[in-house]
Image (cartoon, helix red, strand yellow):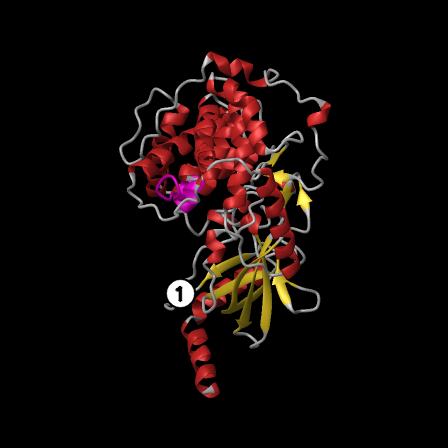
Amino acid sequence: MKTFALSFVALVVLTQAPAFASEQSTCTTTNKGTFLTGTVTTGPKFQAGRQTIDGVKLSHTIIYLRADQDGRSYQVAMDNVYAVDYVRNATSIPASLAALKAGTRVEVCGEKYSDGSGIHWVHSNCGATPKTTAPNGWVKTLSSSGTVGANLERSEAYCYLWN
Amino acid sequence: MTPARTVCTIAGVATLLAVLAPRLWPDTPPPAPEPAPHPIAAAPPAARQWFATSPVPTPARADFVAAPAVPLYGRNGRVVDLQGLDVATFIARRNAAARTGDVRAAYDIYQATSICAAAADPLPDFADAADRGEAEAERARVQALCAGVSAVQLQERMTFLGQAAQAGNHDAQIDFFMEGPRGRPLGADVAADDPQLQAWKGQALGYLQQAGTQCDHFALALLANAYDLGQLVPRDARMTMAYTIASAAARHAALSDQQLRARFGEELTDADFAAARQAGAQLARQDCPAGG
């Protein structure tokens, strides 16, 4: 069973290899991020904002994914303010992120936690020059046919909080 | 640039400017494919009194209770100051003024009621149990403040909001979009062709554009998102880029071609990219003539 599962993952990765190669290259080379693909194992949960800037609470949506690259589980912390359908200070998960249920295939580009257990900064960097500590990140869904979706963390409506 | 590319660029600019025409040249008839915004009444003379002191008397000291340590948020995400009152009392003190055309009182009532509306939304799954505990405690506090506020008043808040938005208040115009149709999230169990939904879309678009013409960077950014998601209008990456440029300009931030290419380069042809660049610059000049 395990062999079958691994074969399936390998098949999925191989059939989508060209798209992944381009995405990976853009993430790691151009956008200075760490690239992961995988399957969501724990669906979205809301994390209240620990920080408030100009009256806007910086809440997150948390998912876990099992990475294709190493089979490990990673926490993915997505800033809600970068979701295109975010409502300021809402105690709710933006609908676009709420759709990342268990089983959804995703790819993320961001910065790994210092202990390696997760990844954050998976969002636009508001046009700033990307750095490894502030990459131009993303969260995208992957369809079964290998189509890569749009970045779910691309809104720049709240960039004014930082620049 | 090759002749063919030049023709494409000119065609792209022409198309995009045609879409923007109602904004750039108000007398130009709206193009066929774009749903015309719901007609917005011109700001009435009463708009001049917007910044005037509200006729509602300041409550006596005895009316004040301890100021909330944790801010109260409306459904629009704004911090609302109830001045130490509960919501029902706050509304009652402004009701007469709001119903006789005082747009400040109308917006104040909307804001207070929107606290209660936010508390009626279901709580999400939390990553942290402590966060859930805090959220539930906050809900209990808000529900106590909202005791005596009826479902009719919750619904009526959207009328007061519309009143303030129509009078030209930028915050209200943005809130009208943020609240969603009938004060519910966009896309929540409403058929796409629902006439009320269509009317709301037209109004929301018009209000955001009105706020945008006053160089409100947030309204311009929301317009970029609306075109990006296809929320109010059909999805249009060129318009998203144009409004992104205008929003940045309103914040005194110029976006380089490199930055714009990083975001829009894959999605737009060279001709569309050039057209969007030009339209964005034009929007910025018109909406922010003083440079933001």
B111 sits to left or right of A58: left
Q: Nearer the viewer, residue A68 or A23?
A: A68
Q: Is residue A48 left or right of residue B1?
A: right
Work out which quarter of the rendered image holds the N terminus of chain B and state it. top left
Segment tinted magenta in the rendering: B226-240
Give me the residue at 42% from left, 50% from top.
Answer: B267
Query: In the rendered image, which quarter is residue B218 located in?
Result: top right
Type of the residue with mark 1: Ser
Q: Is residue B198 above or below residue A92?
A: above
Q: Is residue B245 visible?
A: no
Residue displayed at 67% across by 57% down: A133
Position of residue A81 relative to residue B169, above or below, is below
Q: Is residue B232 magenta?
A: yes
Say few, some or many: other residues with alpha carbon within 10 Å of mark 1 (under 14 / 14 to 19 / 20 or more).
few
Mark 1 = which residue? A143
Give the image quarter of residue B19: top left
Return the x and y of residue B56 as percentages of the image width and height: 60, 18
> Chain letter of disc 1?
A
Name the quadrant of the C terminus of chain B.
top right
Q: Position of residue B80 (x, y in %)?
A: 61, 34
Residue B50, above or below A50: above
Residue B112 appears in the rendering: yes
The image shows residue B138 at horizontal and vertical percentages of 63, 47
- Residue at image x 68%, y 42%? B70
Q: Position of residue A111 (x, y in %)?
A: 63, 61
Foreground of the two, A108 or B267: A108
Say which element carries label 1: loop
